[in-house]
């Protein structure tokens, strides 16, 4: 459920001088129109920026709405594409004027690491460097999501990172479930073709099946690892996935 948008600037700045205008600004524009459910807030932010740009308004009101757009998920790459596209219809000088403001608003984004960008795209923490790193090629991270009832961990792989072939042993029950929550990666069982994993994909791994999983070459990758309870369950780490095997993936 999205957070309700509220605004008090109208009453704070014009409440005594123009109470009707203040009421329309705070209660109607931001109270009703911005909270209308047919269009998501991010899309409303984009529409507003383009509308102000088309009107030639490049003052503090546009800066406010650029900041609002950034806070509601519009990335630097997206705003650059939006302004460029709108410039073709609104005029070149307006494009230059809006880009000057947008560069200031998104100035700090260039300093954000790829790890931070990936963290901002998923709902679970990346956590700390994986204590089982000796069984991985590349860097990975591990964050406990639940340690009671059913153990669940978020495992995050940097681009190109993958774990070794391994087997979840158990006399009965056991195995593991993988739920992709971000990025793009792969899962492969011994003797079978690799399976690409994208957000929302679920892999069920029975006990005693030799397999590996990890990130694509060009993408961070996070999945929840859900440990299935079993009798005498243990994990056996095996040989690494070779460069020749991995290089065949897209």
Image: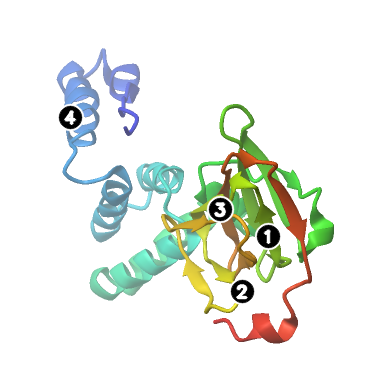
How far is mark 4 from mark 3, CA to CA?
38 Å
Instruction: Tell me where residue 214 appears, x and y as whole percent.
Output: 63, 65
Is residue 32 at all visible to an observer of this figure? yes
Task: Categorize mark 1 by other alpha carbons within 10 Å: few (<14), some (14-19), many (20+).
Answer: many
Asked if residue 47 is positioned above or below residue 88 in the image, the reply reads above
Q: Which is more N-terminal, label 3 or label 4?
A: 4
From the top left corner, tell me how far across and down residue 1 is, in percent.
Answer: 31, 32
Mark in front: 1 vs 3: 1
Q: Earlier in the sequence, mark 2 or mark 1?
A: 1
Mark with earlier residue (2, 4): 4
Query: Under tag 1, what secondary structure?
Result: strand
Q: How far is the residue under mark 2 from the one under mark 4? A: 56 Å
Name the residue beneath numbered marker 4. 32
N-terminal of the two: label 1 or label 3?
Answer: 1
Reading the image, the residue beneath label 3 is 223
Q: Residue at x 45, y 48 (%)?
A: 70
Q: Secondary structure at mark 4?
A: helix
- Specify whether 200 is left or right of 104: left
Mark nearer the viewer, 2 or 3: 2
């Amino acid at each position: 459920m999205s957070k309700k948008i509220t605004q008090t600037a109208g009453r704070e700045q014009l409440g005594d001088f123009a109470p009707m205008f203040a009421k329309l600004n705070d209660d109607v524009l931001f109270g009703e129109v911005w909270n209308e459910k047919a269009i998501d807030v991010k899309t409303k932010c984009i529409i507003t920026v383009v509308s102000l740009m088309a009107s030639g308004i490049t003052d503090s009101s546009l800066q406010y709405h650029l900041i609002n757009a950034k806070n509601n998920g519009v990335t630097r790459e997206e705003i650059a594409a939006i302004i460029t596209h709108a410039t073709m219809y609104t005029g070149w000088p307006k494009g230059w004027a809006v880009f000057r403001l947008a560069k200031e608003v998104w100035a700090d984004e260039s300093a954000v690491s790829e790890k931070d960008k990936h963290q901002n795209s998923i709902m679970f923490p990346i956590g700390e460097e994986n204590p089982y790193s000796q069984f991985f090629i590349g860097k990975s991270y591990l964050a406990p999501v639940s340690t009671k009832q059913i153990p669940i961990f978020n495992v995050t792989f940097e681009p190109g990172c993958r774990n070794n072939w391994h087997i979840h042993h158990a006399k009965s029950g056991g195995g593991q479930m993988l739920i992709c929550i971000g990025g793009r990666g792969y899962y492969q069982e011994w003797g079978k073709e690799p399976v690409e994993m994208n957000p929302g994909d679920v892999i069920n791994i029975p006990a005693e099946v030799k397999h590996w999983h990890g990130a694509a070459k060009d993408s961070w990758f996070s999945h929840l690892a859900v440990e299935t309870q079993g009798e005498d369950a243990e994990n056996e780490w095996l040989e690494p996935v070779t460069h020749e095997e991995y290089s065949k993936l897209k």
